[in-house]
Amino acid sequence: MKKNSEYLSAIREAVCSICVDSDEHGECTLTKNELCAVEYFLPRILEAVHSVENHDMDEYIEALREKVCKYCKTAESEESCHLREDVNCSLDRYFPLIVETILKVDSDH
Ligand code: SF4
Ligand code: SF4
């Protein structure tokens, strides 16, 4: 069983390094008052990704909405989220890469 810290460091390497909210060293530039959903919801994100068996991106997105977005205070309703609509949620913006990174950690020995 992989530890959450292993997933987090793989995500930092793959996602934070290219995130528009990181500096040239891949360090997050969000302030303490801004929360990144990727870190905040990591256990739920892992649960969502691991609940999908057939590697279908639509199903991963469905699981994300069901297991993460539903619990996020930013969501105005089950269908609507202004951060998502403005492409301003890092979790949503980089979700395919996040899924790929999590699956890669799973397959690493
Ligand atoms: S906003 Fe999230 S994904 Fe982007 S650099 Fe910061 S921690 Fe990483
Ligand atoms: S897309 Fe919206 S509801 Fe889902 S995690 Fe991001 S901010 Fe929260």
Image: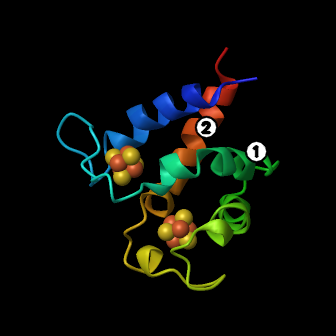
In the rendered view, tell whether residue 65 sits above or below residue 34: below
Where's residue 54, x and y in %? Answer: 80, 50
What residue type is disc 1 on?
His
x and y, in percent, of residue 10 in the image: 49, 30
Residue holding disc 1? 50
Residue at 52% from the left image edge and 50% from the top image edge:
40
Rate crowding at label 2 as few (under 14), some (14 to 19) or many (20 or more) other CA atoms within 10 Å. Answer: some
Q: In the displayed orientation, state which residue is furthest to the top.
A: 109
- The extreme left residue here reads 24
Residue furthest front as drawn: 33
Picture coordinates of residue 103 (x, y %)?
65, 36
For label 1, the SS is: helix
**At x 65% / y 62%, what residue is drawn?**
68
Instruction: Determine the residue positioned at 41% across, 43% down.
Output: 15
Q: Which mark is residue 83?
A: none
Which residue, given by chain and number where applicable, does mark 2 sit on?
A: 102
Q: Is residue 108 left or right of residue 5?
A: right
Instruction: Give the side of residue 17 with respect to residue 25, left or right.
Output: right
